[in-house]
Every structure is written in C-alpha cells, then in structure tokens.
Image (cartoon, rainbow, N blue to C red):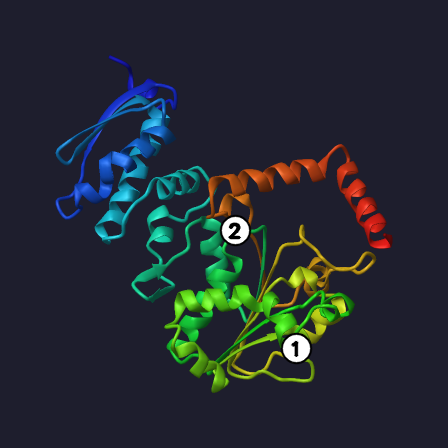
C-alpha cells in the first residue's frame, strides 16, 4: 500500500469515486449514447472511467484523476442547470481546466447573455467570457481575433440585451465599405445596392436575435441603424450601443473619426481581425495602431481572442494555426512574399 506522499504525486496511481447528486439528471451528464462520457474519456485517456447508477469511478495517475473528477463536477453543474452538454463543450471545459485561470468552466458555460427565439446565447470559451465581461465593465472595448471567435456575434447579443433592458435607446451597427470607391462604381444598382453586401453579416446576426418581422419597424424608427462607416462622420451618438465591425479595414483617421462619435451613456465595441486587412497597399490599419495610441487610457479594454476561442468547425481553428505558422516563418519571409505578390497584383 503506497504512502500518502506517493499518492500525492501527480504520476502516482489512484482509484477514486464520486457520487453525482440526485438533482443532476444522469442522462444530461452522460449525453445521448454516452457522447459526453466518451468525450471525458478522450480528454483524459490515461484514466479509466466507469459509471454505475450515479456513481462515477476513476482509476489512473493521480494528477489526471484529480482533473477528470473536477471536470465531471463542473459538467454536473452545467447539467443541473438543464443545459444540454455536447462533446464540444467537454473539450472546451478540458482546455479551461488546464488553463492558468481561476474561472470555472461551469460559470463560463452557464453564463447567459441573451435568450431569444427559443435559444440562449452564451460564451463558450474563457476568451469569450473575458470579452463579454470587458464589454460589461468598459465604455469602449476592442475585440481582436480571427474568424469564428464570436467577436461580432457576442457584441451583437450584448447590444440587443442592452436595448431590451432599456440601458440604451438604440443600436448603431457600422462597417467600413472598403471597396466603396472605384471598383464598386462598376457594379450595377444604387449606392445602397452596392454597399448592402458589406453590411449583410450584421443583418444576419440581427435576424438570429430578434423577431425578423420587428426588425424593419425598429430600423424605420431609428432604434436600430445599420450603415457604412462613412455615414458616421459629423455625428454624436448618445444613449446608444455602437458596434464597428471589420475594423481592420479602417485607416487611423477613420478609427479616430469613429471613436470620437461617442456620446453620453453610450457603449462602443470595435471588432476586427488584423490578419485579414483589405486596405490598399501602403495604408495602415487603424485597428493595428489604435492600442498604442490609447495605451493608458482608463475605461478602454483590449481583448485578444485566438484560435482556442474558435467555435466553428474544428478545422477552422487548425486552419488559423496553420496560417499563423506560415506567416511566422522563416523569419516572416512568407508574409513578405505575400505582400510583394499583393503589390504586383495591384499594379496589374
């Protein structure tokens, strides 16, 4: 029989069991066809996990057993809330438990932002939870990160919630229409017809969160406004929740113009991905330089989301990481090669 000192070592073998409280439905905790249980086993492959009734037994290295037990406890809290668990949620919870943070996975996965049209919008990662908290705590929040991290979608959910709870009187959504000059001029239709595709993702998010029949009425009344960034010039926006999307495609001058639209009792969220800048060659991205400009100013938060916060298909996260590796080496030569190619294409 090992001494207690040996049992405390992370690599010491340990057998332990926990009893799931009666108010936690085991069918929720284990998932359909034991999908959740299989995901827990996949996250801790060195641990043998067995379930009999509401008793869960663990056997394996002490460190892994301790983490697996914590994971099941956290998942039980989520199941107790009535929220359905999935294999994806388990994978995210495993990453949270192994991250250097005091945030509990159950607190992240049960944090409701907005309930609408029969479903609830919640953060799904630590980065997303930190981003949502920053929006609550700061007047201006920058959400910077790759595609699929929920930057715009979560900001939209916070905007709709602020409107419904009467903390603001209107929502203003804006994007730069990068091609709003010469190239769009060759397309048929009015200016609105040409600009509308740039704003379509914002409309799509609105339709996810509000009754589609109410949106035209809210827009006609000015309660919700969706407009190109150029329409913001010369305005002061009071009592509003303002979102600037695709901010990597603003110039420093446009970013300054937008930020100085801020009025009383308003909140601003700026989102963008600095790896996908579509500005003409030689034009600096306002999103890339703004943190250095605003450094040290209180009530302004910068949140960086990463591939770990991607909540789309698993491959999206892997694609983002692959491109980051390609951009980084050797010594940034691939990034320089891409810029040279872009300049040649522009001259062509």
Task: Classify 10 Å Cα crowding around label 2: few (below 14), some (14-19), many (20 and above).
Answer: some
On residue 190, the disc is: 1
| Residue under the image location 76 percent in, 32 percent down | 330
Relative to 246, is 226 above or below? below
Relative to 275, is 137 above or below? below
| Residue 345 coordinates in the image, percent (x, y) | 82, 50
* Circle 1 or circle 2, nearest the eye: 1
Q: Regarding mark 1 in the picture, which secondary structure is present there?
A: loop
| Residue under the image location 43 percent in, 74 percent down | 162
Task: Classify 10 Å Cα crowding around label 1: few (below 14), some (14-19), many (20 and above).
Answer: few
Relative to 21, is 81 above or below? below
| Cβ–Cβ under 8 Å for marks 1 and 2 | no
| Residue 154 coordinates in the image, percent (x, y) | 47, 61
Q: Regarding mark 2 in the picture, which secondary structure is present there?
A: loop
| Residue 20 coordinates in the image, percent (x, y) | 18, 39
Residue that badge 2 annotates: 148
On residue 259, the disc is: none
């Amino acid at each position: 029989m090992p001494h207690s000192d040996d049992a405390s070592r992370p690599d010491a073998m340990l057998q332990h069991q926990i009893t799931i409280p009666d108010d936690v439905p085991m069918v929720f905790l284990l998932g359909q066809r034991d999908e959740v249980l299989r995901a827990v086993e996949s996250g801790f492959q060195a641990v043998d996990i067995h379930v009999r009734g509401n008793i869960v037994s663990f056997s394996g290295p002490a460190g892994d057993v301790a983490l697996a037990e914590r994971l099941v406890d956290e998942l039980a809290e989520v199941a107790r809330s009535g929220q359905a668990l999935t294999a994806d949620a388990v994978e995210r919870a495993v990453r949270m438990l192994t991250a250097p943070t005091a945030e509990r996975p159950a607190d992240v996965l049960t944090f409701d932002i907005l309930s609408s049209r029969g479903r609830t919008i919640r953060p799904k990662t630590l980065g997303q939870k930190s981003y949502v908290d920053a929006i609550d705590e700061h007047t201006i929040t920058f959400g910077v990160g790759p595609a699929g991290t929920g930057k715009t979608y979560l900001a939209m959910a916070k905007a709709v919630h602020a409107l419904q709870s009467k903390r603001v009187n209107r929502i203003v959504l804006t994007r730069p229409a990068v091609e709003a000059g010469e190239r769009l001029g060759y397309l048929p239709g009015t200016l609105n017809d040409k600009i509308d595709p740039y704003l379509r993702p914002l409309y799509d998010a609105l339709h996810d969160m509000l009754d589609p029949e109410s949106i035209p009425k809210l827009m006609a009344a000015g309660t919700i406004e969706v407009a190109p960034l150029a329409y913001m010039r010369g305005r002061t926006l009071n009592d509003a929740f303002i979102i600037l999307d695709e901010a990597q495609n603003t110039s420093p001058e446009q970013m300054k113009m937008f930020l100085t639209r801020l009025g009383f009792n308003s909140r601003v969220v700026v989102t963008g991905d600095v790896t996908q800048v579509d500005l003409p060659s030689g034009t600096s991205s306002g999103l890339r330089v703004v943190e250095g400009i605003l450094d040290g100013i209180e009530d302004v938060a910068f949140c960086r989301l990463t591939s770990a916060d991607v909540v789309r298909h698993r491959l999206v996260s892997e694609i983002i990481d692959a491109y980051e590796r390609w951009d980084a080496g050797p010594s940034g030569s691939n990034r320089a090669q891409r810029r040279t190619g872009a300049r040649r294409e522009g001259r062509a």
